[in-house]
Image (cartoon, grey):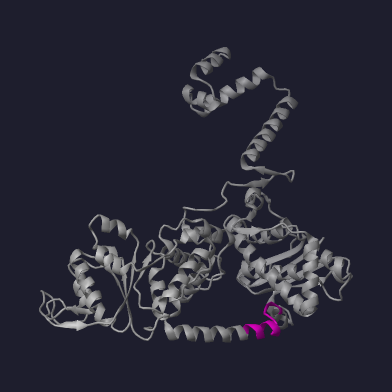
Amino acid sequence: MPSSIIPSYPDSQDIIAKLRFLPEEGKIWLGEQRVMLMQVQTMATFRKEIINTIGIKRAQGFFMRLGYHSGLKDAELAREIRGQNMTIEDGFMTGPQLHTLRGVVKVVPIALEIAPEKQHFYAEFEWQDSFEVATNQAVFNQLKEPACWMLLGYACAYSSQFMNQDIQFREVECRGCGDQRCRIIGKPAQEWEDHETFAGLFREDPLIDELYELQSQVAHLESDIARHHSDEKYRPIGKTPGFMESLDLIDRAAGSEVPIMLLGETGSGKEILARRVHEQSKRAKGPFIAINCAAIPSDLIESELFGVEKGAYTGAVQSRAGRFERAHGGTLFLDELAELSPRAQAALLRALQEHQIERVGGQESRHVDVRIVAATHGDLSQRVEDGRFRADLFFRLNAYPVTIPPLRERCDDIPLLAEHFLAHSEHQHRIKTLGFTDQALSALQAHPWPGNIRELQNIIERGVILTGDRQSISEQALFGQQMVHGTGGRGKTIAASGHLQTDGEQSILEENVTLEALCKSILNHGIGLEALEEALLECAYQETSGNVSAAARRLGLSRAALDYRLKKHGKS
């Protein structure tokens, strides 16, 4: 077992470099986490409201769970910043450093023992100037039990996630209940006698459990209703005004028999809305049949739509019904309608006018009762003007047009859609992530989405696969190296003085500080200007193996200027 040591903190500059302020955008980023500056007094009021509403015991669990979630996120950040570059002890100290950086407490290390191969862990820290002690004193004076609930939840989650082992901390002393200091001890959970009872604080209490149970029952009933009509994955998702307006138009026409034309870009969800038409129509108990006209060769589209008789052409070894017959009594969705060939357009017009179709190679007319919902991503009226689409067919199908807004115009719907596709992908791949980082969500909303909802679904599936279990989905997991929103070099960082500065200012400041220190050192050693120039010339000349042109470039001089100086010092 390793001996107990008093750990020291690594230099914090790599953490501070991850902190970026974007005052014009109203955002502060710590890595991919969006953070806030909030007054301690506001937190005190919040704490008081929670305790008065649900009682002190439930409030304790509530605030510990808040801290727990924060600890999980910071463990990821610690691995990102220092996971490969430091010893496990120094890497672990990132959590206390982050806690201190956030201004919630000053964490003073007392002891740290880590032996992953033996599943051994022991840590002891002192908390100085805990914000939770301050908030408690502001509203309750003194409690009978330790008061640093969020900080304790953070320590448990951070350590467990970082060590990949169930670690529990206890606040063995607390100024909030009259002790001289706040001190915590952390060990593997099973080494605490009350570890099962303590773990219960990280689960929702019976009041919340009861509420969740009722919500679960309601959700189950709602999903049963949804499955009665159609599969849940076809449920339209969104709340932006443009999308809601489209839904309203669809719902108004769904109960009628009028043909509906859905206009919108590829991947904008037209088939899902066509299913909504069907589900809310009188034909809901009948079939819903969809066909993508652009995905079928023009010489086969008629047989797909109207069916084929045996022997009609080479390869037609048996008779089969087409989409019209299969949709009898229900709804036929014609996607990418503009891609129909002129011959298929004529046959489609006859079917709509006479409710009769003939299979390819057949002589018998067959009655069909079908409601048409069509869709196109192009300007069909322009095709009519150009003579590429029949005007009589266009006017028959375009009786009730509905425009579906592209995803880039539905920014507020992106988080809803993202969570929907996340749940679907996690279930499909049997992966449970920690959700999206704040920066990943911001990136999703900033992306232009040329591929619309289909592109969003594919990107989120990629993110789930690349992220894996119990990790947050980052912007890079979603978009790869082509980051669309990352703060990167944008925004302001914190200087050593504590003031905000741009990266350029930081570089200039560092250069000036370094140059000033160098000049002072040269003067203190009594080195004159001539000697300094000669030494610089000699060093550049030696570094470039006597290549005068290269030495001139190193010194920022022209070759002629360097030749002059070399001659002055007798070097050429």
428 sits left or right of 318 in the view = right
Q: Which residues are magenta?
A: 201-212
Name which quarter of the figure residue 99 lies in: bottom right
Q: Report if residue 156 is visible in the image.
A: no
Where residue 210 sits: x, y (%)?
Answer: 66, 86
Residue 308 or 217: which is nearer the viewer?
Answer: 308
- Residue nearest the observer in this picture, 321 or 160: 321
Q: Residue at x 86, y 68 (%)?
A: 139
In the image, is 128 to the left or to the right of 409?
A: right
Q: Is residue 202 magenta?
A: yes
Counting from the top left corner in percent of width and height, residue 267 is at: 39, 64
356 magenta-colored: no
User: Foreground residue, 457 or 527?
Assistant: 457
Residue 482: where, in percent of width, then height? 46, 52
**Residue appearing at x 55%, y 53% in the figure:** 486
Residue 511, above or below 265: above
Residue at 69%, 73% in the rendered image:
65
- Foreground residue, 316 or 198? 316
Above or below 452: residue 197: below
Left/right placement of residue 378 relative to residue 307 reads right
Q: Classify residue 254 by image quadrant.
A: bottom left
In the image, 59: left or right of 18? Answer: right
